[in-house]
Amino acid sequence: MFNRFLTLIIAVFLLSSLSLTFIWKDATAREIFGDSPVTSVYRISQDLGGKWDNFSSLRQAWAEENRKSQGDEHKGVALFNQKSMIIPSDQGFHVAVKRFKVTGKWGYKTAQLVLSGVYGKARVFLNGIDDANYLGEFEGVGGTYYLDISSTRFDFNKENVLYIELSKSGLQQKKMLGWLWPEYGRITGEIRLEAVSETTIDYTKTTVAYDLENKKLILNTGLKHHLTLDHGPWAINGVLKDKDQKAAECLLPLNSNGEYEQGITLVFELPDPKFWSPDNPYLYELNLVLSNSEGDYDSVQFPIGIKKVTGSNQRWILNGKNFEVKGEIISSQQGYLIRNQQQLEDYLKKSKAQGMNLIYFMGFFPDESWLFCADRLGMGVWLEMPADFISKEKIPSYTQFQELLLISERHPSVLALTAGKELESSPKTEDYFREITKRIPTLPVYHMKIFADNEKKDLQTNILTGNGLQGEWGKVSFNKSFPDEDKNNTSWEKEIIAAIIWFLWLLFLFIQRVVSGKWNYTDLFNDRPKRAVRVALFWGTLGFISRMVTLAAVIVSLLFVIPLQLLVRIPYDMSAPVSVRSQPPLLLWLLLSFFFILIKIFQAGLAEAWLSQKPGALGFCCWLERRSNWILFAGAAWIISVYWKVWYLPLIVYAAFTFLLFPLRVKDVWKAGGKYRSVLILPMTLLCGIAVMIFSHWSDFRYLFQIALPLMKVLLSSIFSM
């Protein structure tokens, strides 16, 4: 009988695993849009956004693309985890592949691949995945990145294949337990291919500042020499326009400094500037033209604004006037939803009409289209650097955020920075904040504490509460007009029906086990037990299985009951939990149930090896679990938790009975002729593995232990107050 039960258990586990694998659906991805007013008239541009193929590894992507190129795209597709996706979107991925064509007009120009809004370590290949096809790699933190491509790398006769592999960046791995947490790379900005002249203006290196004493506008930008430094000298001409009228002009001749990336500074005489403010968001138009004696040209046009920020972290002064913040916080998912619905401008206009003067972007660095729109409409912006939950041994250098700091310096709407979130205090941490403040001296720079009391330790610290952030500078509150998650896809809608049906089964099982009577340990060795004993063993086995199924039900219920909105405080990628919650709850329940059953049988099998008589792993499990009639109370607690939202009640009931019956469980092992330490072989092995892991990553776990208590306090108080 036990052998048939064991075969059935293994079969159900394998069937549920395969079913979940085949019907697995990722969290709903959103295509996101964004416009940029930056124009480059002398560049040939090809947008690579849109549909891409998504793979789990470079090797699989290469094999599939080879089949397609040979006309065998319908063979073996089922062997590979290929899906379609949209870029830019909020969907994470490991490998994305795009086919595209280039025409002959690209043959005489250097090309550069432009990728913006990249999160994760990116490696890029063209027409293969070998070293000869390698284009380059970079650590993306949300900025814009360039990779040069020689025209000889393209195939002008057929489609080219671009491979982008994303993995955890070094910064993501520095987070507390970041090496363990499933973090996906993503691209939330545009991808385009540009045919350019040999030397181009690098807009991403642009910053704007105004010298009040000398009445001059100082513009820092960069030149990018792509394949050679021999095309100089150059001349760059900058024209600043005020409503189509020339306000200032600067002509700068220059030679190469020996570097392929060359910084330059343009100084404009501007005695009577018009400052940007939320009440009067005035923008100039800047036109930069680069040329040389060989007839190469490049030009870039974009809007710029001038602001004068003084004051302190305690009190903000904008253009000589006190600026009291009244703003709202949006999360990454809210930001993606707004861009997906192409409501960016409408959202900012609506917020401004409601009296808001600032938007705080929490947990992500926004696409630059947000900042251009905020510049134009007169909405202040508060940005976060992606330095979160890092122990003192791993504090990053501010130079890792160079691209983001440059963005902050060139947009007049950026009024404040949060340089880090829950960074462990240390001299190295203080140096990090000091360097950020020195790098951008005109903006208030803060450190956000999430799991702390409400008493501020210094003016640089902000405490995040359930309502948002508040200080003498003003207040920003959480935005609730856009949802953080799609509740239709991430909830267990019929959980109460499942709980009631399961309780009725437990009640029926309880009655049958009482009626069928008791059985002894020696009955496990009887090849021909009496009918009454067989019936008792049958219901006893179902009792053991039902206990594990009840435990799985409690865990799956907990998975769906915790609202993800609470996790907006925690700057980790929530794609994996959301994907799990997008699966059928009943299938998750079934898989987890039989996984627990097999683990329990494996534990009993290890313990059985130390017994003089071998009752079989499943039989020994049934012997140890024969007092599990109490699961009826856990089933009732599940129903109560669904009705009254007391999610912790089933856990308390389950843990309480397990603890109370522990002495009897030890006694049952002794009756079987064994010692309880044999039952602890598997748990102790797991504990030793965990201990080794903690020792290997001690800095992370030490910091986790340091903040665990206030973290649990905040989460529990938030859940209980719902």
Image (cartoon, rainbow, N blue to C red):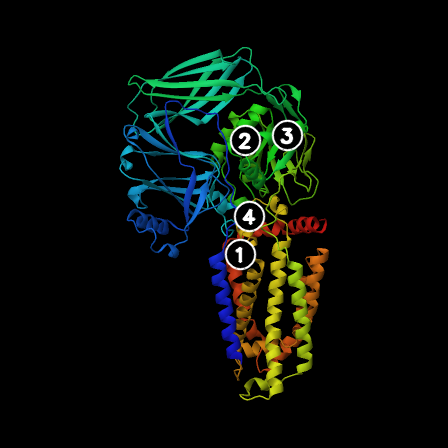
> What kind of residue is marked 2?
Trp
Local SS, label 3:
helix
Q: Which residue lies at the image location 63% right of the left edge and 58% below the top edge?
A: 557
> What kind of residue is marked 1?
Ile
Along the line of sight, which residue is nearer the eye, 390 or 95? 95
Nearer the N terminus, badge 2 or badge 3? Answer: 3
Nearer the N terminus, badge 1 or badge 3? Answer: 3
Mark-to-mark CA distance, 1 and 4: 23 Å
Q: Is the C-beta separation of discs 1 and 3 under 8 Å? A: no
Task: Tell us which disc is closer to us: 1 or 2.
Answer: 2
Q: Which mark is residue 370?
A: 2
Nearer the N terminus, badge 4 or badge 2? Answer: 2
Mark-to-mark CA distance, 1 and 3: 49 Å
According to the image, label 3 marks what residue? Answer: 350
Note whether residue 444 is visible.
Answer: no
Task: Tell us which disc is closer to us: 1 or 3.
Answer: 3
> What kind of residue is marked 4?
Met
Instruction: State the image coordinates of residue 154 (x, y, percent, origin top left).
Output: 29, 36
According to the image, label 1 marks what residue? Answer: 694
Nearer the N terminus, badge 1 or badge 4? Answer: 4
Q: Is the C-beta separation of discs 1 and 2 under 8 Å? A: no
According to the image, label 4 marks what residue? Answer: 574
